[in-house]
Amino acid sequence: MPQATAYAIDGPTGRFARTTIERREPGPTEVLFDIAYAGICHSDIHTARGEWGPVKYPLVPGHEIAGVVRQVGAEVTRFAVGDRVGVGCFVDSCGQCEQCREGDEQFCDGPGGTVWTYNGTGRDGLPTAGGYSSCITVEADYVCRIPEGIELASAAPLLCAGITLYSPLKRWGAGPGKRVAIVGMGGLGHMGVQIAAALGAEVAVISQTRSKEADGLRFGAAEYHAVSEPGTLRGLRKSFDLIVSTVSADQNIGALLNCLKTGGVLVDVGLPEHPVTLSLGTLVGQRRVLAGSNIGGIAETQEMLDFCAGHGLAAQVEVIGADDIDAAYDRVVAADVRYRFVIDTATFTA
Ligand SMILES: [Zn+2]
Ligand SMILES: [Zn+2]
């Protein structure tokens, strides 16, 4: 069995420590790849700290994974040794249900449902372990190809942050002639600005402060608005065709909805802790839409990677070593990162 050096956390208040885990010998339809980089997503932190329900400790998080193929099963034709590949938030699904057939494997209704990359249960009945490790074995159908032209380090965050924004922007028609606002300029938002601009939309950022204004404009935004300045949202009344909110803090959704034109769409991809109170007249009176979105399917994730490569887009990353994971978690919680931490697995043996 292939052995992986991994970094695991053993409880909600624990610290990351080096360990060794076993990966499957790749079956006929599986790929074993050496992980080069793993992004740190805020979801990793919520899960590792037990904030999103039961956790199978010791936990090896990581669902923004980029690396190079080491070994392929006998029936794998799409990948060869040496290929640059990536894996995102899930590693398996039933493949038969309506959602899977539609390419929305992240919403699988089949037996076992979507198998999440970590803190899930794989087909082998064993807990899944994510990208904070030196290698991983995954069904080839759940592996994406990372195009030449994107560095592996800056490709890794695309597998979650990139697709989380690409999917709703595409679905709800971001493009030429459309005014699109991205709310929040973190790991998700900084990808949203780049992707929406590359799709041809006129992009605005709605952020808490102006501290990231220069970056936002560099990423392709035409406007930058700070809600800490009084009257900002009121001044943006009926301004946008589409708003994508990446914010996980509590916020006034009604005030955001009022920034939509008649018939506009607000897509939320953040998960605030508390329920939202909303006057439905804000929707009804202007035929507005309030929608949610959750990552994307495998085909769409590949489309996103190809799109980013074709437009020269990538995540802006801060590469860290294994010893820095705990400190990086604290900095992500404090919103002190521009814009994604990525763990370099070359530091695992140092
Ligand atoms: Zn994520
Ligand atoms: Zn399914």
Image (cartoon, helix red, strand yellow):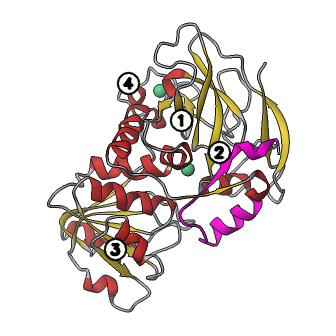
Closer-to-camera residue (348/61):
348
Mark 1 belongs to which amino acid?
Answer: Gly
Q: Earlier in the sequence, mark 3 or mark 4?
A: 4
Residue carrying label 4: 101
Q: Earlier in the sequence, mark 1 or mark 2?
A: 2
How far from the left and from the top, in percent, is residue 311? Answer: 32, 48
Residue carrying label 3: 256
Q: Secondary structure at mark 2?
A: loop
How far from the left and from the top, in percent, is residue 163? Answer: 43, 46
Query: Could you tell me how far apart the alpha carbons at marks 3 and 2 are, in whole angstroms?
Result: 32 Å
| Residue appearing at x 81%, y 43% in the figure | 58
Q: Are marks 4 and 1 in contact (CB under 8 Å)?
A: no
Check residue 343 for magenta coloring: yes
Query: Could you tell me how far apart the alpha carbons at marks 1 and 3 are, in whole angstroms?
Result: 35 Å
Screen quadrant of the C terminus: top right
How far from the left and from the top, in percent, is residue 82? Answer: 57, 24
Query: Could you tell me how far apart the alpha carbons at marks 3 and 4 are, in whole angstroms?
Result: 35 Å
Q: Earlier in the sequence, mark 4 or mark 1?
A: 1
Q: Is residue 140 left or right of residue 322?
A: left
Q: Is residue 57 above or below residue 259?
A: above
Residue carrying label 1: 86
Place residue 73 in its image quadrant. top right
Q: Earlier in the sequence, mark 1 or mark 3?
A: 1
